[in-house]
Image (tube, coloured by chain):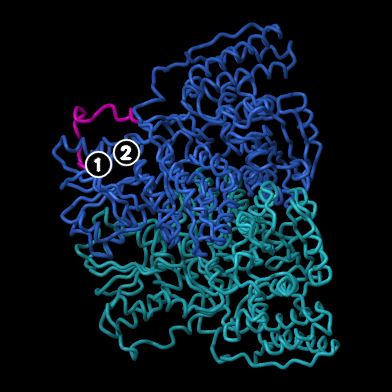
Chain colours: A cyan, B blue
Amino acid sequence: MISYITKKHIDRILAASGKVPAFKVQQIIADICRYNCLSAIKVAGSGHLGSSFSAMDVVVYLYFNRLNIVKKGFSSPDRDIYFSSKGHDVPGLYSVFYALGILDDSALFTLRRYKGLDGHPDVGTKGIESNTGSLGMGLAKAKGMAWAKSKLKSDGHVYVLLGDGELQEGQNYESFQNIAHQKVDGLTAIVDRNRIQTDKLTDHIISLGDLKSKVSSFGWEVMEADGHNYDELDKAIAKRHTIKGKPVLIIANTTKGKGVGFMEYDGSGPLYNWHSGAPDDVNFMKASDELFLKIQEQLSAAGIAAVEKTDVPGQGQRTTGGKASKEFVSKAYGETLVKLAPGNERIVVLDGDLSADCKVRDFENAYPERFIENGIAEQDMVSTAGGLARSGFLPVVNSFASFLVSRANEQIYNNACEKTKIIYACHFAGLLPAGPGKSHQSVRDISLLSAIPNIEIIQPSCGDEARMITEYAVNEAKDNVAIRMVIGPSPRLLKLPEAYKLTRGRGVVLKEGNDGLLFAYGPVMINESLLASDILKRVGYNLKVVNMPWLNRFDIQWLSKHIAGQKNIFVLEDHSTRGGLGEMMLRSLTEAKAMPDSFNLKIFGIEDEFPVCGTPWEVLAHHRLAGADLAKRIFGKDIDASLIESSVEEVYTVDAPQ
Amino acid sequence: MISYITKKHIDRILAASGKVPAFKVQQIIADICRYNCLSAIKVAGSGHLGSSFSAMDVVVYLYFNRLNIVKKGFSSPDRDIYFSSKGHDVPGLYSVFYALGILDDSALFTLRRYKGLDGHPDVGTKGIESNTGSLGMGLAKAKGMAWAKSKLKSDGHVYVLLGDGELQEGQNYESFQNIAHQKVDGLTAIVDRNRIQTDKLTDHIISLGDLKSKVSSFGWEVMEADGHNYDELDKAIAKRHTIKGKPVLIIANTTKGKGVGFMEYDGSGPLYNWHSGAPDDVNFMKASDELFLKIQEQLSAAGIAAVEKTDVPGQGQRTTGGKASKEFVSKAYGETLVKLAPGNERIVVLDGDLSADCKVRDFENAYPERFIENGIAEQDMVSTAGGLARSGFLPVVNSFASFLVSRANEQIYNNACEKTKIIYACHFAGLLPAGPGKSHQSVRDISLLSAIPNIEIIQPSCGDEARMITEYAVNEAKDNVAIRMVIGPSPRLLKLPEAYKLTRGRGVVLKEGNDGLLFAYGPVMINESLLASDILKRVGYNLKVVNMPWLNRFDIQWLSKHIAGQKNIFVLEDHSTRGGLGEMMLRSLTEAKAMPDSFNLKIFGIEDEFPVCGTPWEVLAHHRLAGADLAKRIFGKDIDASLIESSVEEVYTVDAPQ
């Protein structure tokens, strides 16, 4: 049973501030927020515990002592501003918002749900000052806000929290340099120095060295404080406000997972388990009980009456599990790399602190001398790959598509100009999982690579095809290859025809039919296509479904053959409808005069809006991309509910890595 | 008359090394290289003098004392590697290549010409180790090369030259951090510390502060040397090679424009005039004479026989001038911003060290309190704009399209997610000027923005339209606006119909015709379209030409009306044919069933290759986009030469800002 501690109790405890030292009370509030945050993540099925907990005391200290936002209101130009640049600690912030009355009970447990609280901060949520989630942007955004306050002569101070792993992103150093030069006053940067990134020590991934001297050398005043000690935080912030004309960074030394013994880093092992994802039931209960006991002990010691647990409403809703297969296309990719490595000494794998999520940890362990851990520094990683490729190596660059292809876009282009060959493994491509929100959902990456002439973009529909594509990329491709991979388990185990061989520019027919032809790619959209085709069959509409793994290379002859005779042509993008497979293929086929006369065309995908956050089935439904929606859109009219399987959503899991 | 000093003289002087101290001889060689470089830039009509001259002694020192490349050959894995990360000093490098015999006389004066020497380094040129030109990538690429050498146990050392302005790019700090952590040995970074960027002091734009302590704080050994003193350089490099296990940076203190008195920085004024562009005839002769005299004096003092000048062959070819108009769309844009500023206090202009090129210097001077000079730090600039927009300002962000939209792509997306409004002024968009090469030619930017749902991309065809678009962007647009602007003068003064008003999603008919319909945008391609239409008229083919400034917003009804009855439809992109106007418009019109039955379609543009370097007429011809080429491609067969105006190229100038 998942429970939380209500605002009523929080208000009662806060009222004790007169008798009990305020910081003592706030420490208890922080643990209550941890308790509620843990439950919210458990209900959501995913979320970032570790840094929600490490940052919690800093956040509680600021909101209960320094920020005037509750008094001024969120639209006041004179308000103080706080936001986290790393952003994935936002479940912790939501629980503080609940304690402050900014969010109510019904909102708190909508974490990562449709129309609920985004997995990374979004300004659509009350109290959120900035969209973050991709790293390194916060300092600059804070600079803009502080510049605005100064220009408008408004009151209020801007506090921005940085992760320490985040300080591997180069943009931070642009901002350190520029804020100092531009003499932008009125902002304070705080580092949540928990010394752990995704699952390893920052010192192991890319050490920050002597952070204090590093940031000082940029002309900043740097202080340190125990990030869990309210007196120390108070002293540092008080001192900060005596400093004028020089930007200030406070290094808050914290413990990742703070508050739950077994989630705290104890320095003994290199792998940290609680960065993201919800704990399983056993660990959840263990953590929850420990926090609850600690809260009660503190209350008792302070002479404040104990709190009670309240059951989280609506726990019946399934959020994890589902009938998803155990197949990960990225696992097949990672295994293939390991398999090919002995025969090809040129392969070097590069990683941006996502080795486990990108399924290259086996390669890392098996071939450490050919594995470059590059930290959260995508630009450096991609240009390093450029240098390796110029020296005869075959670099395989790994990160999430939304970061790799976007943050390092110019670097990818620069490498491509050298006409070497590099493999870009673009993980977490597409709409799902949608819990992490729009900073992580990658629905622009095809368009971001499409105008580079020598990059082939290919996406596997299943593990078997991932193996073929990886082998093709390593052994056969002449050009650069971007392998676009869904990160979640494949919703179904797709069985490709026995005789199927990956052939440049060609797809493979999964279902025959004469009433319409649908092109799709990737496990998620192929699954919805097949669901749609099943439903359509029941109304007598035979949809031909083609898996088209080649997203920007077309065998016009093969395609023409399969289009011949079809009057209704559809493309289903796991991407924006702009700049994806559909537009590129349509152009090529139209120029080749391979399209039939007066055909109907519809490209399905993310259409003129941002991808929404939520569970897979919520989000597919919102974008009208679930099988049933597609069936109706293809059929052109409503389909009787009895003909639609109700179990559509059961094939997905909401477990999200980030 | 433009002249140079031949290899014969250089070899004779080098042969004196036995009698005259080698460094003395090399200093003379460096001045000869400066002389030849100046002539090459004058012949080319553009190029970067200032930093070619400041880096010259470092380059000559390295090639004549440290690098084994002439001995080992450029394909040897054991060769030493040198490249410049900033890249725009490459005319200087070419002149050193000539002195070394890597390039011959016929190659030296093909700077910025088709199939000649690219305006920024390209590995297609013998001796060039890496494509650079966009800043901040060199350290990482050097890292990859040094890692490869170490892995392969090859000989050779990697030297990478950085600009000091370049150190405003955050990617450098990723690399400083990562190289130190990864203990990559075998590379040396050298900073050409000439203290000047485009036209202002680095200390004025964004100060690097105490560079030595800054880079030291990243765990690097930092040394300093006079970058024009061969003994000091030699001492520093020798010392560098005694250091193991710690990366080394050498700050070479240099003088921008070194070698020509009036091109050297004397500290007295803030504006530097010799960063890019060829000097006019008077200044060229003055500089050339001064260098020649200096060379002769040094030779005489060293007891070496004087050199003679040789005329540069083929000087008859016109490279500057042309019949181009005096109109710059960006000037109209900049003037409009100044005009709108008093009425709109929300406007803030941001610049990335390109104020003059982006025509916002008038705004900078008129409204310094609303102008943020952000240095070469596009990511920080864009995220700062995000913070400003969240605070109620209307930021207008300026840089070259290829840097702004690519380097800061994720930051633009992040801002867009906040649903604020920002204007991105994307300068130097499109194929021309092509002299700077593929790092600067922006033919991907439409595709890079297209999948962001709330950015309107609009490109003016002339000054009048630029004014309308700027006013629309500031006063009317609800969404973000990317204004895509050609940087060169408009090839012709386009007169739009009197009644024309900018209307969202609609173009304007420039020529009526029933044999085919061509959509185009921007001054360059509109000009070629009109030339094509003139030629086609002579063979009885009436081409309708529509100026379509809206690149991703379509008024389907308006378009349908103009497409009705047309069987031959063409789109001319100043962009890759992938992800531009054509594909997006075709999709929208096809889905709306607005395309005629069995029409012919051709999208012209940069087709499946990188944009080539050269003069405008060379490059338009290569890509088959010159009016005459278009006429033939539209007509579908050859057109008699007598019907084609021979003066096509005369409308362009090769003067290029970068």
Query: Which span is picked out in magenta?
Result: B632-651
Nearest the eye: A248 or A578: A248
Q: CA distance from mark 1 to mark 2?
A: 9 Å
Q: Type of residue at label 1?
A: Arg
Q: Is residue B653 magenta?
A: no
Disc 1, SS: helix
Chain-order first, disc 1 or disc 2: 2
Q: Which residue is mark 1?
A: B633
In the rendered view, does A510 fall on the left or right side of A396?
left
Q: Is residue B636 magenta?
A: yes
| Quadrant of image for the C terminus of chain A | bottom right
Inspect this view and state whether residue B17 appears: yes
Give the x, y percent position of residue A328.
54, 72
Query: Label 2: chain?
Result: B
Disc 2, SS: loop
Q: Are marks 1 and 2 on the same chain?
A: yes
| Residue displayed at 41% across by 74% down | A623
Tag 1 near tag 2, CB within 8 Å: yes
Q: Which residue is mark 2?
A: B624
Crowd class of label 1 (few under 14; some 14 to 19; many from 20; radius 10 Å): some
In the rendered view, does A460 fall on the left or right side of B52?
left
Whether residue A165 is situated above or below residue A91 in the rendered picture = above
| Quadrant of image for the N terminus of chain A | bottom right
